[in-house]
Every structure is written in structure tokens, then in C-alpha cells.
Amino acid sequence: MKIAIIGGGLAGLTAAAYLSNSPDTEGTVFERSPQIGGRAFTYEKSGFTLNYGAHAVYGIDRHTLQNMENELGLQFQSRQVDKRKVVYAKRESLTPAPLDFVNIVKTEVLTGMEKVRFITEIAAIIGHLHQLKKHRTLGEYLEHSQASQDVKELWEHLVCSNFFISPEDARQVSGEAIASYYHNLFLSGRPVSYILGSWSTITNQLRSKVEANEKWSIALKEPVESIRKENGKYILKTKTREDLEFDQVVLAMPVQQVTKLLETTPWNQAIEPYKNNTANEVLVYDIGLSKIVSRPFHYISDMDNKLFISDVSATDHTVAPSGGQLLQGIAYLNDDALSDDEKKQYLESKVQQMEKLFDTYYPGWREVTEVKRMSKKAMVSSVKNIVTNRLLPHQLPDVPLYFCGDGCEGKGELAERSFSSGRAVAKLLLSRTGTLTH
């Protein structure tokens, strides 16, 4: 079976790594960029390792990466963020983030009775008893909840932090998605970890797995421009080649690119319901400092302005040169209804809020900045997981193609959905050859 995988990001590389393990397959991964990884691309500058996609992993001990580590023989190390050094900033005061039962007791975000209520809610989620899963959205649940405003705000803020979305969008996440996500996370012994060496540690191993099979290849800087089906075969045209013939095609790229690629095919109508999906975007502000200016905590989340700063180098020592410090600021965005001029002003206000947060907790950062990188509209996920969007299934009725990526159905959020959907699609295809392995 000859397979084309369009997209060399986390999902495409995962699918290719599993498929290339089979002696009954051959294929090509087509990637339009000059490097693999997609939005998990990693590069170095002045001794700092910068990631276009944050390499934090939530609940790594219960994560799809654990399956991949065993099934593909991946080797990587991770380090857990110190929960005792994760803080929330609210009304210019700091308090421990209520990430576990110890910090819930210590935090000043909630009063004594509110802490008891919140612990009860966590226990209900762990036991699959929480009413949240029965509500269409978080907003609907909060409207019916008898909880205090502080408890409601905490729920909203947690969803902002873990789904990387604005408060307005957090209220539009389905109750079922939130309940499932936090059931998994609250049971985790390692809620937030970093892959040491960044995503390239994973993507380089996946690439090696693919290229170890001489019947497989990765074509960089070769975007696919069209697909057609003739005599039971798929014929691809790329930027540099024509009439490439395959038995199966996997689309492992953002849904927005999928709909564009298929708009002149017979499958256009089937993909129509997914054309209006909105992407999940954030403002990212990375600064590499020549020395450690301050390290009172590893993560600070500004509850008032809905942004946070991670001291990435405090957890992953590989991302900064000796004695240096790498900070990454993220601002959750919600500018969908704004005009172009309003969006520009809105994004500039987010930059100013971020720099004020840097000034407050990392004084002197401006004088020792070696590397600065800012992306005012970085795509975190191609489909924001809210009820007005639709995640793409691995297969659509009457469409003989396969789909995977962070905009598709799968386990978890963000990178995990890429890994899990790529793995699932590979197993579907391998089941067709009768060589499925576990």
C-alpha cells in the first residue's frame, strides 16, 4: 500500500512513523516548509532554543506520548514544572495556583468555604460524577451553578490556561470536553511537564523512524497543489512534480488548508461544514536574557488580564545558554469581532500588558535581552475547541481520504490531539493491510 501524507507536523510525522513500521507500506510525507515539525518547529538563536509551539505537555504520565514511547521506541526525558512555584496574580497580589489539594488549601484565590466546594467539584470530576459533563457549555454550567463568583472565575481561568483561549471562548467549550480533560489531568501525577530539548527531540526521532524504511521519504519544500482520483488511485500534483500515484492519502494539516486543497474536488461539499471553523490564536512574546534576572517562580498567570509568563529555562535547562534565562509570555486573544484598526490597537494593548508583567516580576530584563521574538497572531490550534466549531473526524462519509491533526477528533488538547489523531489514522490504515500491531 502506497500512502501520501500531506503535512509534516506532529500529526503527519506520527502517522508516518507508525505506517513506516509496516513492511507492507511505502510512502511520502509532503511538507511545504523547509523543515519538519509544522507549528512545533524548533530553532536556535544566540544559544537559545525557541519553539513556535510551546513544548509543555499536560498530564504526561497519562499522555499519548507514553503510548508512542512504548510502541515506537521513542527515547526522551521530561521534567515536571514545580507546582509550588506556579502562582496566580490577581489585583496586584500573588497566591499559589490551586493545581492540587495542597495548593488549594494555600491559595487566596478562594475563601475557606469556596475551597471546600472546589475540592468537592474536583472529586466529582475524578469520579465521573460532576454535572459539568451534562451541560452544553461551561457558560451554561456556570449560569446554573450556585457557586460564588470567585469559583466561577477560577473555572473560567483554568479553561483559559489549559485550552489557551480567551474567557469569552472558555465559556463556549463543551462541558463534556472540559470534564473529560480535567478527569485525566486531576488524576495525573505530573500535570505540567516540558520535553527536555524541545519538540525537536520528538520530531527528529519520528523522522528517523520514517527514513529508516527505504520505501519511505520526506519531501520538504514540496506543497501538494491538487488531488484527483482516477481508476482507484490518487493522483497528486505538487509544486515540483506531477502525476504522483498513491493508494491512500492522509491529510495532516490545518483544517483551513484542507478545505482549500479540496475545494475543486468532488469532496468539496462534504468538507463544507468545516470551512467556517475558527483557529485558536495567541500572542507569543519570547525573551532570551544573558543572565537570570529573577526566579521567584516558574509560572505566573495574570488573572486580571488573562496572560501568563513561563520561565521555560527553570524547567528545561537545555533551552538557554549557561547562566541565561528564557521567558515566554502568552496572551489569550479574542479579537474576532473587531475591525482591522481595532485589532491593531487590541494587540498593541496586549503587548503593553505583557511588558508591564515582565517589568513587574523580572526587573532589568530590557537591559540584558539577547533574543526577542514576538508573534502577535500565533496559531495554537487550527480549530478552537468550542461548540460553534466542529472537529474533523478521521474519516468522512463518501470521502475516501483520512484526516489527522490538532483540528481533528482525538484525545486531549493541543499537541496531544495531533499525536492521538495521527496514531489513530495510522492504525486504521494498518488494519486494512492486516498488519496492525499493538
Image: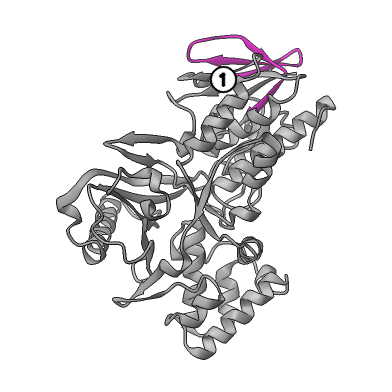
Q: Residue at x 39, y 48 (%)?
A: 317
Quarter holding residue 10: top right
In the displayed structure, 250 sits above or below 289; it is above
In the displayed structure, 295 sits above or below 43; it is below
Circle 1 is placed at which residue position?
226
Q: Residue furthest front?
A: 322
Where is the N terminus found, in terms of image quarters? top right
In the displayed structure, 133 sits above or below 11; it is below
Quarter holding residue 186: bottom right
Q: Residue at x 44, y 47 (%)?
A: 54
Where is the C terminus found, in terms of image quarters? top right
Q: Position of residue 189 (x, y in %)?
A: 61, 62
Q: Is residue 124 visible?
A: yes
Q: Position of residue 90 (x, y in %)?
A: 35, 75
Q: Is residue 48 left or right of residue 262?
A: left
Name the residue nearer the viewer: 37 or 281. Answer: 37
Instruction: Give the residues in magenta.
Output: 227-250
Q: Position of residue 106 (x, y in %)?
A: 46, 81
Dot 1 alpha-carbon crowd within 10 angstroms: few under 14, some 14 to 19, many 20 or more: some
Q: Residue at x 51, y 43 (%)?
A: 382
Instruction: Name the dominant secondary structure of the magenta segment.
Output: strand
Q: Is residue 409 visible?
A: no
Label 1: which secondary element: strand
Q: Amino acid at mark 1?
A: Ser
- How many numbered circles does the render carry? 1
Q: Position of residue 230 (x, y in %)?
A: 71, 13
Magenta region includes residue 307? no
Q: Residue furthest right?
A: 434
